[in-house]
Image: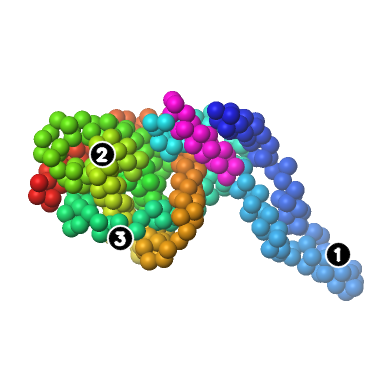
Amino acid sequence: MTMFLLSSLVLLSLFTTASAFGSPRNDPLKIANSNKLRPISIPQETPVSRLKVASISQEIYSPPSKLAKLHEFCSDRAPGVALSVALAHLSLSMAKTSMGVHVSPLLWATIFGMTYGNLLHSPEAKKSLAAGVKFSKGRLLRFGIILYGFKITLQQIAGIGIAGLMTDVFMVVSTLALGMNLGTKLLKLDRATSTLISSGAAICGCSAVLATQPVVGGESHEVSAAVGTVVLGGTLSMFLYPLLYKAIPFLANSPKLMGIYTGSTIHEIAGVVAAGNAMGGDIAFTAVVTKLARVLLLAPMLTTLSFLQNRKCLKEGQGRKDCKFTLPWFAFGFVGISALNSFVSFPAAMVKMASKTSAYALVCAMAALGVDSDFKAIRRLGSKPLLLAAMLWVWLAVGGLGVARLFVGA
């Protein structure tokens, strides 16, 4: 509670001083740069005066040093990054309280970020935060996804066997294809929103939504809407699956089937852990490993989405210069770290620290996306994102059970 109050005070101070950061008058470096670029009059009396003026002009127009560039880079991003960090700390603290323990820190970050961003009406304040918010939702997001690889090893994936892998692949591909088609063709949602919601349901919830955003070019309000629907579906599954385990005889008689079904269909890893532990240790282990194998499909999914985006761009008649195939390098960094973690024995403390850093970076990125979201833009989306998420949830819960039973053979 103390940390929660401390975070609130930090946010309050950032809110009241944001406009001060936004004023150009308070940035001495920008004043210096503007003075350097101020035009001067060159006297024409004598060759000597021309030489003096030339030497003065070279000093005035000389490019800034590397230290000055670094200072400008940091000072431009400091307010927005500080805000993202404070909101992330507040979200993580809230998730540890008795009231917020059942809600993902990523959802708390969305809520706090959107609230702060929509209460901040000063254009100067928003301008001062823009560079740091962009840095947090871009660079910090990619950094968090790469470090996410420390949670997975290939040895873990091999533990679920071919049945678990086939179930994962089938559910990821079918959920993504179903969601994108239902969203764009039936509900008339734009492609980015449909893809964000579908990727969250297909892979790993909020983390997949965040990873997909730079590939499909989703707007901040679309990401926030997708995160909200994904968290709602994942939370519902977390409480429903233990009830299904007790109510359906063939699930109760096969811990392997229940574990693969749970890991291949619940949205978030935290939800898989919670539901699995509620049903027993064997089920929890199988469910978590199945979920990790599903997460590993993030890289091929993002590469495929990037290819589809490029092909759609070319079909619409745009030139090749405008249609670039964007390789999601951070997704391959994630796979590379997973592979490295499989063959190199890192100290347990290092792996734990990397996992915590990954989680913190993702919460910072989600907070930044929340700050950049617009309540009005989310309202304009209407109920269609929620309806699409509900359809995908039914497919995961009902269709996923049939697919898991087919491959496991129970």
For this orientation, the residue located farthest to the top is 99
| Magenta segment | 80-100
Eye-nearest disc, 2 or 3: 2
Label at residue 280: 2
Would residue 273 appear left or right of 260 to someone viewing this image? right
Q: Which of marks 2 and 3 is nearer the N terminus?
A: 3
For mark 2, does the 10 Å Cα neighbourhood hold few (<14), some (14 to 19), or many (20 or more) residues? Answer: few
Residue ID at (36%, 63%): 342
Q: Is residue 93 within the magenta segment?
A: yes
Tell me where residue 265 appears, x and y as whole percent. Answer: 23, 43
Residue ID at (57%, 47%): 131
For mark 1, does the 10 Å Cα neighbourhood hold few (<14), some (14 to 19), or many (20 or more) residues? Answer: few
The residue that mark 1 highlights is: 43
Would residue 189 appear left or right of 225 to someone viewing this image? left
Q: What residue type is labelled 2?
A: Gly
Tell me where residue 79 appears, x and y as whole percent. Answer: 62, 42
Q: Is residue 299 within the magenta segment?
A: no
Eye-nearest disc, 2 or 1: 2
Foreground residue among 164 and 381 = 164
Q: Earlier in the sequence, mark 2 or mark 1?
A: 1
One can see residue 308 in this view: no
Residue ID at (68%, 54%): 71
The residue that mark 3 highlights is: 155
Q: Which of marks 1 and 3 is nearer the N terminus?
A: 1
- 58 in relation to 364, above or below: below
